[in-house]
Image (cartoon, helix red, strand yellow):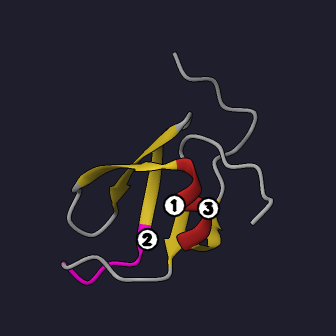
Amino acid sequence: MDEKLMVGDIIKLKKKHPCGGYEWEVLRIGTDFKIRCTTCDREVWLPRREVLRRMTKVSSRKESGELNE
């Protein structure tokens, strides 16, 4: 996927998490991504390449006008 991901986006991955959830919130972007399962709140670190390979779509986008303070 060539979409630009941002912190706060909800993404859907190909395989489901052991808890049964498919959707993950992006918490940190860099060489590695930190993502959190929206079903059970488990946080994992994955290499950028793995996240982009496993991702099927962006379920929801964070508004670009919001400021994180």
Q: Residues within 10 Å of mark 2 (few under 14, many from 20)?
A: many
* CA–CA distance in space, label 3 to label 1: 6 Å
Which residues are the magenta region? 19-23
Marks 3 and 1: CB-CB under 8 Å?
yes
Please name the residue that numbered disc 3 is placed on.
52
Taking the image as shown, residue 58 lies to the left or right of residue 27, namely: right
* In this view, 13 is above or below 30: below
Of labels 2 and 1, earlier in sequence is: 2
Residue 7 in magenta stretch: no
Could you say which is closer to the camera, residue 12 or residue 2? Answer: 2
Q: Which residue is mark 1?
A: 50
Question: How much space separates mark 2 and mark 1, taking CA atoms?
Answer: 15 Å
On the rendered structure, is 59 left or right of 38?
right
Residue placed under numbered mark 2 in the picture: 23
Taking the spot 55% from the left edge, 49% from the top edge, the residue there is 48
Residue in the picture at 30% in, 51% down: 44
Q: Identity of the amino acid at label 3?
A: Leu
